[in-house]
Image (cartoon, coloured by chain):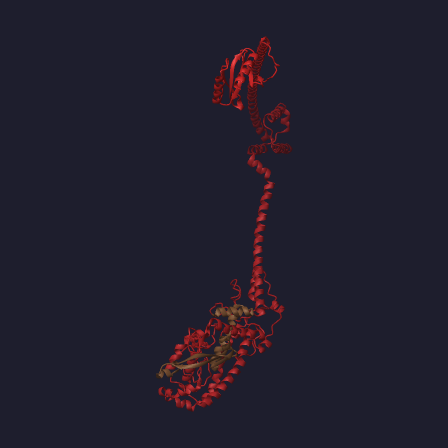
Amino acid sequence: MIKHEIIDKISKYFKLTEFEAEKVYDDIFSIIMNGVKEDNIVDVTNFGEFIIKYNNGKSNGSSNGSEYRRTVEFLSSSGLEEELNQSIIGDASGIYKSVGTTQTTPVIESPTVEPPTVEPPIVDTPIVEPPIAEPPVVEPPTLETPVVETSTVEPPIVKSIDAEPPTVEKPASESISIEEELRRKREEILSKITGPILTVPPILSLDKKEEKPIEPTEPIKPTELTEPEKIEEEAPVKDIFEAPVIPVIEEKTGIIDSDIKTVEEKTEEQADDLSQKSFSDYFSEVSGETKSVTAPEPLNEPEKDVIPKSAVLLHNEIVGSSEPPKTPLIEEPVKSQIPPVSETTPKPELRSEDNSYYIWYKDSESNPTDTQTLSYEYELLYQATKEAEYKSKLRIFVTTFIVFFSVVLLLLIFSPLIYKFFFTPEEFKQNIEKTQEPPPDVSEQKGTPNVIPENEIQQQEQNQVQPPQDTNSQKQVQNEQQITQQNPPVKKEEHQITQETSKQQKLEEQKKQEQQKQEEKKNQEQLKQEQKKQEQEQREQKKLEQKKLELQKQEQKKEEQQKKEQQKKEQQKKEQQQKEQQKKDQQKPPVEKKIEGMVKNSLGWMDDKNKVIYVQLENGKYTIQESAWDSESKANKRLSTVESLGVSGLKGNIVKADLGAKGTWFRIRFGEFSSLEEARKKAEEFRSKRK
Amino acid sequence: MNTVDLINKVAVSNNLSTGRAEMIISIITEKITDKLKKDGSATIEDFGTFHIETKKIGSSIFAESLAGIKKYVLFTPDKHFQDIVNT
């Protein structure tokens, strides 16, 4: 049953339970069915397409109203057809070759070579894939090898077929029995192949696995048999092409059978391997036997034992240790995982002849040992590289620190000298000269008492005149003098000569210094005098300014006084005027303030009865103010009306009065009267007439 | 429905990666082809049966040779599959 085989494979490869694998299996087909139902087409690459068709033969297009039922049709892909048809071709080649052979011994040849010269006596071989899928000697088997090689081998096989006559047919009963035998043998071979696997992990034991396919030393020529019936039918056709071959076969069938069996075993081994090897077969099947043999080791153990040599060597090189590896090293079959560091590292044994590296992609499932080894190796490498980096960085930092620290120390130690040399070079040189000069003798010092005090005086003066020297330099000079005094005089005779010269020089210098001092004194005096003059001038200027200020103040005062006097005079005048006015007012007839029916206001006397105002003029006379209007036209009208009344002695005039905010008013006034009584009488006449 | 869709659906329904789903599908197809090559037919429960048929191409002598024979695969769906399709 395919289902069980598929489920077993899935559970083994992907480490799933049978239940889960079955579930996956069912899901796939259910999804396909639903896809066909919904989308009417399901395409599976390298296999075919499932399409819906209708019973009346039409496609998913329209059908004219008649009832129909949908069916599913399968269209195989070109790849599948090619595989199936190649099986035909393989069968044919095997059949033809079996018919056309004369040799008794089987000749196993390479499949990729010599199609016309092949003469293998293989007749009743089982269905086997074409000779392409031989195991490669050196190269690792890949998924594409069987497919690719099939294409390359097709032409030679075809030629062989075309050249050779068709195969010989045999009775059906014999073919069935042969088939059964072949199947049994195949099963035996398969059981042998799926025998106990080596204990070494697969990555490290590539040689053995590579050797497996290489075991058959003799050349192999797998063949195929599709249907013995057809072969039997084609036997007479062969006779046309190779008539003498047939009797040989008929005579030697017994011999051939035995030989064939031995060859078949070998060929089946390889052919079955190749035929059965497919994409899925490249995933290693862990059978029960293998499991029992290759029990997975505990995780802890491989950590100790599985340290590849190259990793340890790398580590040692980086670290710089020459200790032998503690753990038992395992030779690396594949070195592509860890590239070589240097020429001194030993070459891996499992290296191809071309000194090229290759990578073995083996299984989809990862063995814990492999992952552990790889991870441990990488960890070692990583650690080693990191250590090297840190060490290099440390060296750099330490060297820079030492350099800078030393520079700083040197600067601190020699800082005074540096300061002198760079900032006060003159003093430095003088000190050097003084140290070079020999120290003076004590006897000479006594004999020249005058010199000493003068020197002392000069020094004192220098100290006074010159700017104050730095304390450091003074101290150094003192120290040097002390040193020179302390040091005993050596070689007096030589010193005397030098002393005399030095004395002369000193005298000269003293003279010069005296002259300089005198000059300086003069200069100072001159400066002082100038300063004094300047001060005097300044004082005089100040005095003048003060005087000016005083004069100004006096003038101001005078002006103020004058102003005050003027003000006083003006006030006096005003007072006089006021007095005069008062006098005049007093001279004027007394105004009757209290008159019956009249009220005094700002204008004059207001008569409520007659509704007029009696205004006193400047000449002392009184007028009658009849009314006041805000416009001149109105005032003129009123005047004309009053004059039209014909009152005698009422000469009207309009007086304009600007009251400011209140506006301009036009006052109508009539006549001039010497007294109020007259004005009043006239006003009464006026009113009487107006009524 | 493409193979990509099929793979994605299988992966989603069974919490698998797309690579594993693809490998499972390839395993199934390979098994079916192997079975077809060996036995000439392959049956799948609740799905259908695949079987091989041959055709002779041409009428000449060469057509009768194996080069003139061509195989093709036929599929007969199961009742379960037909019922699903026709519902």
Q: Nearer the viewer, residue A32 or A464?
A: A32
Q: Colour of chain B?
A: brown
Q: Nearer the viewer, residue A666 or A18?
A: A666
Taking the image as shown, residue A522 lies to the left or right of residue A137, namely right
- Considering every residue shown, the one lying at the far top of the view is A587
- Residue A15 place in picture, x, y as percent: 57, 72
Residue A580: quadrant of the picture: top right
Q: Nearer the viewer, residue A246 or B54?
A: B54
Which residue is drawn at the image coordinates 50% and 86% (left, top)? A180
Rendered view: A527 above or below A14? above
Residue A628 in view: yes
Q: Nearer the viewer, residue A674 or A293?
A: A674
Residue A367: quadrant of the picture: bottom right
Residue A544 in view: no
- Considering every residue shown, the one lying at the far left of the view is B60
- Residue A214 place in picture, x, y as percent: 49, 77
Residue A78: quadrant of the picture: bottom left
- Residue A590 place in picture, x, y as percent: 60, 10
In this figure, what is the number of numbered marks? Answer: 0
Please give the letter of the chain rendered in red.
Answer: A
